[in-house]
Amino acid sequence: MKNNNLFAALRAAFPKDLDAVAVETDTGLNYSWRDLERATAMMANLLQSLDLPQGARVAVQVEKSVEALMLYLATLRAGYVFLPLNTAYQSAEIEYFIGNAEPSVVVCSRKNFGWVSKIAFKAGTQNVFTLDDDRTGSLLDRAAHCSDRHEVVQRSADDLAAILYTSGTTGRSKGAMLSHGNMLSNALVLKDYWAWQPGDVLIHALPIFHVHGLFVAIHGALINGSKMIWLARFDPKLVVQKLPEATVFMGVPTLYVRLLAEPGLTREACRHMRLFVAGSAPLLIETFTEWQERTGHTILERYGMSETAMLTSNPYDGERRGGTVGFALPGVSLRVQDDAGQPVPTGEIGSIQVKGPNVFRGYWRMPEKTKEEFTADGYFKTGDVGKIDERGYITIVGRSKDLIISGGYNVYPAEIEGYINDMPGVAESAVVGVPHPDFGEVGVAIMIAKPGAKLDGEQIIARLKAQLANFKIPKRCFIVGELPRNTMGKVQKNVLREQHKALFA
């Protein structure tokens, strides 16, 4: 019987020479394919020794490191479910995720062990380990005593492999359940579509707690047996320095803007490069054009979501059109419909719906929400609004509701408004996204004070910083007498966006 465990497919793609370099770090360390094989076996054996229940979740909030990558692979290998958490999340957020996912294992940075372990033990988690980016921590200490041989656990394509938390535009975060089959189908399609080749080398400069860095980039390199140049954090100077040794780079638009600010970014520096991929947020046409002029390369834009991994892509061979996200990937069925559920004419704007082997299994413990998000004929409603032109190129024009994408991260106004509205003296608040030259978009908060209360915008921002991840914090806070409303009394966010759109121009 074929083992559909995603790790089995990734492992099968390792090169014949296991002593070749698999990952080269920015601290001068080299990890071989044999190191990946042995370390993931030891970590998988450690997880299995804990006597975890079937389908146990392993929640991980640690700094980016090769060991963190190994922990992800080991979780797959041992047949458990990986739950990556953004390193910027604070206690209120972690408390929610751990309470909702009920992980059997939590792995955190040593500096956070005090408060994270308290939350985890209180929620009934049995095992809390530490892992730091300097190859230390109790996870590695314990794994060191385990065997470096391990039989990959049998999994079916439908078995759960990961849960990615994604906020709805209203209310708390939802856990998108991705199966081994979802992720493997996507990795194999992209391998062909982006023409991965023997000898390709990827510069990995993204975080590893969301789809882009963890799945698209890592799976892409591993399923091709390709070496990764691993940067713990994005450093434009270092990326430019490493370009001559690489062939593939993936980034969010903000990274491309920062690279363009480097004088060293020239055609000569990029002469060995084969592919630059952008996603996670809209790429401004100015950035697209300037990149072409400076490097001689055309950025390939694509579109995906936590719930679906990659859905569309501009072609590898063929015209890559700026401002579009290309065509639906092979195996993905994409349509644009109006509010009545009817197809819209070519070039008209409507809601984007998708279907395919990459589309998630639903939201964790939210059967009603899951049902709501799928059509009767099995299409997932992405919540994005877009159009398809006469040549089939897809353009995303916005998001239904008011999602803000800041530096490639999703920011949900409803979540931030909830925290602001709970603060003393606040009667009501509205958070909107406005254009920003570096981050693409940032949040701005507008609020009304309760009668007799005096609010201070700086203080509100300081309070939010203690509760929420930094990328969610509004860049500016305004206190107003009233918020613009329609006849139904609903706040008109479009009016607020218009009023503040030139703030950072």
Image: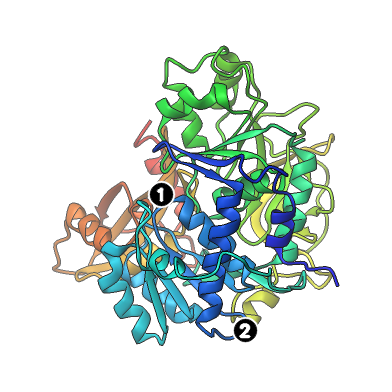
> Relative to 322, does residue 10 appear above or below in the rendering?
below
Residue type of the residue flagged with mark 2: Gln
Residue in the foreground of this view, choosing between 403 and 289: 289
> Relative to 281, does residue 92 appear above or below in the rendering?
below
Q: Residue at x 33, y 72 (%)?
A: 92
Residue 402 seen: no
**11 displayed left or right of 142:** right
Residue 250 screen position, x and y as percent = 58, 37
Question: Residue 106: which numbered mark, if any?
Answer: none
Question: 10 Å neighbourhood of mark 1: few (<14), some, or many (≥20)?
Answer: many
Residue 121 seen: yes
Residue 404 screen position, x and y as percent = 48, 51
Question: Residue 54: which numbered mark, if any?
Answer: 2
**6 displayed left or right of 215:** right
Residue 300 screen position, x and y as percent = 67, 33
Task: Tell me which label, 2 or 1, sits earlier in the chain.
Answer: 2
**180 displayed left or right of 227:** right
Question: 10 Å neighbourhood of mark 2: few (<14), some, or many (≥20)?
Answer: few
Q: Quadrant of residue 156?
A: bottom right
Q: Residue at x 64, y 62 (%)?
A: 307
Residue type of the residue flagged with mark 1: Leu
Q: Secondary structure at mark 1?
A: helix
Residue topped by disc 1: 496
Residue in the foreground of this view, choosing between 465 and 29: 29
